[in-house]
Image: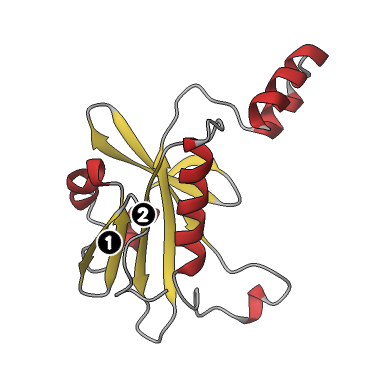
Amino acid sequence: MEAGARAPEGFVRLASGSGVVFVEPGFADAAATTGLLESAGLARALAHASGLEGRGPVALLPLGGGEHLCLRPLRRGGILAAFRTEGLAGLARPVAELEATARLRAAGAPVPRPLLVAAALRPGGGWDAAVGTRFEADTVDALAFLEGAPSRERVLRAASAAG
């Protein structure tokens, strides 16, 4: 999926220069104020590491009204990742992740609210991209949950909610 591609269902496309954001319409104005569409805006946003981590550091950006955007960069993976540093070949993967998370949430799965995909075209080609979700305070990731030695009943409730 190229930068000129249509936004996924339920999202709108914002673009400026080499940047593109696919965002939930209710957050389009807030997304614009994050600076993601400015030159090097995605890189600046991701530089605001929050101390939170998933597969890598994530950034928290204020959206107003006490809400925050949790911005997680997408990285090339696999065994050849260290040899292929040119970024993502296209935007299909981040957009597919946005759509999958939206479908899961619509089906009642306990996932964060997907808000956007932000992407910037690299000067030499390839894309830097990040997926943004609404930051959910007072949540615990699965590893921290299990490290807390929950009771069997609590594990079963959590597994049922996640399933």
Q: Nearer the viewer, residue 46 or 118?
A: 118
The quadrant in which residue 110 appears is top right
How crowded pointer 1 is (Cα within 10 Å; few <14, some 14-19, many 20+) is rated as some
Q: Judge left or right: residue 1 versus residue 142.
A: left
Q: Which amino acid type corresponds to the residue marked 2 in the rendered image? A: Glu
Instruction: Please name the residue shown 37% across and 76% down the image.
Output: 2
| 140 over 93 or under it: above or below | above
How crowded pointer 2 is (Cα within 10 Å; few <14, some 14-19, many 20+) is rated as few
For this orientation, the residue located farthest to the right is 152
Q: Judge left or right: residue 1 versus residue 62.
A: right
Q: Which residue is mark 2?
A: 9
Q: Which residue is mark 1?
A: 41
* Residue 122 screen position, x and y as percent: 37, 78
* Residue 61 screen position, x and y as percent: 32, 42
| 127 over 106 or under it: above or below | below
* Residue 83 screen position, x and y as percent: 64, 81
Q: Quadrant of the N terminus?
A: bottom left
Find the distance from the CA under tag 1 to the CA under tag 2.
25 Å
Q: Judge left or right: residue 84 versus residue 50.
A: right
Q: Judge left or right: residue 58 versus residue 149.
A: left
